[in-house]
């Protein structure tokens, strides 16, 4: 059975707070699109014409320096939306978004987004919370990059996916490859594999082929490195 826009929107926290009339208009104006893994969803410098949501899949927000170094900002998973800040400021996009795997995305036109801002108090409240959560995430990512070793950075990047506002549809069993973990944490696949072994040994997660099951989310959020003896 083909998934409808209504079904897709049911994974979004903000959509559940709309009135029936508001939701009906959103359902009529939002479209969906499949993006192949490895493809760009949008590029730095593009005009921002839509708010983008993830129905299924995994995206990475990143930027490439003039010297060719890639800086990873965040991962976006099921139920997450991106680009709200750029729409509010009406400026070109400041980052690239790449699909790490085949993904199905939702696109809300700028006009629909602006109409919700003008008519829905609940939508505005959601955006305030979302922007605050996004700011906290980016501050923590800067801290992780500057202060933590790779094992701890991988742990924190995985934990960051489990934000109830930014990725509300994600479950504790992640269908994610070690290469995708490396992409999200800014490490190589080999280094990500080493970090996952350390985290598995610590009892924080379990690694299977193509998936990771989180056993201790709070432990991932607090992880600084393997315990050492006296």
Image (cartoon, rainbow, N blue to C red):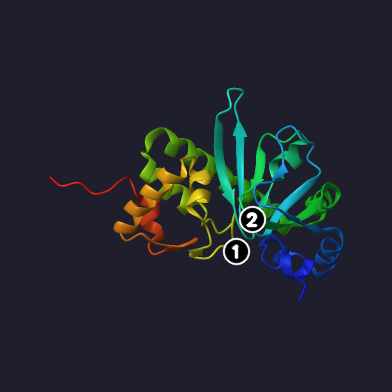
Q: Mark 1: which secondary structure?
A: loop
**Image quarter hosting the N terminus:** bottom right
Question: How far apart in space, not on screen, are marks 1 and 2 (Cα)?
Answer: 8 Å
The foreground one among 193 and 117 is 193
Q: Which residue is mark 2?
A: 80
Q: Quadrant of residue 121?
A: bottom right
Relative placement, left or right, of 228 versus 92 is left
Percent across and percent down for residue 224 are 33, 45
Q: Position of residue 143 (x, y in %)?
A: 44, 36
Tell which of 192 and 218 is nearer to you.
192
Quadrant location of the C terminus in the rendered image: top left
Q: Is residue 91 left or right of residue 134?
A: right
Image spot of residue 191 (x, y percent): 40, 43
Q: Secondary structure at mark 2?
A: loop
Q: Quadrant of residue 147?
A: top left
Query: Residue at position x 50%, y 61% from top?
Result: 210
Q: Which residue sits at x=52%, y=45%? A: 184
Residue 169 tag number: 1
Direction from residue 17 to residue 101 in the image, left or right: left
Question: Which disc is residue 136 wearing?
Answer: none
Outermost residue to the bottom: 1
What residue is drawn where x is 70% and y is 67%? Answer: 16
Give the residue at x 77% y 35%: 46
Question: In the rendering, at what x and y percent does residue 18 appear?
Answer: 76, 64
- Marks 1,2: beta carbons within 8 A: yes
Residue 80 to residue 228: above or below: below
Closer to the chain start, of discs 1 and 2, is: 2
Q: Quadrant of residue 116?
A: bottom right
Farthest residue, direction top? 67
């Amino acid at each position: 059975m083909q998934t409808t826009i209504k079904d897709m929107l049911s994974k979004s926290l903000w959509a559940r707070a709309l009135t029936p009339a508001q939701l009906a208009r959103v359902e009529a104006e939002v479209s969906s699109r499949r993006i192949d893994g490895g493809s760009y969803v949008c590029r730095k410098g593009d005009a921002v014409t839509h708010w983008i949501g993830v129905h299924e899949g995994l995206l990475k927000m990143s930027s490439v320096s003039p010297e060719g170094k890639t800086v990873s900002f965040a991962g976006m998973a099921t139920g997450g939306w991106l680009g709200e800040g750029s729409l509010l400021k009406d400026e070109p996009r400041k980052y690239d978004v790449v699909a790490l795997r085949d993904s199905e995305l939702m696109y809300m036109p700028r006009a629909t987004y602006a109409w919700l801002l003008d008519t829905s108090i609940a939508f505005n409240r959601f955006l305030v919370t979302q922007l605050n959560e996004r700011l906290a995430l980016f501050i923590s990512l800067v801290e992780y990059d500057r202060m933590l070793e790779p094992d701890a950075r991988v742990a924190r990047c995985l934990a960051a996916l489990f934000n109830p506002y930014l990725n509300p549809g994600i479950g504790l069993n992640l269908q994610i490859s070690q290469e995708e973990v490396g992409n999200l944490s800014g490490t190589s696949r080999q280094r990500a594999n080493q970090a996952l072994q350390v985290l598995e040994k610590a009892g924080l997660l379990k690694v299977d082929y193509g998936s990771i099951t989180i056993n201790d989310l709070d432990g991932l959020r607090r992880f600084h490195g393997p315990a050492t003896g006296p």
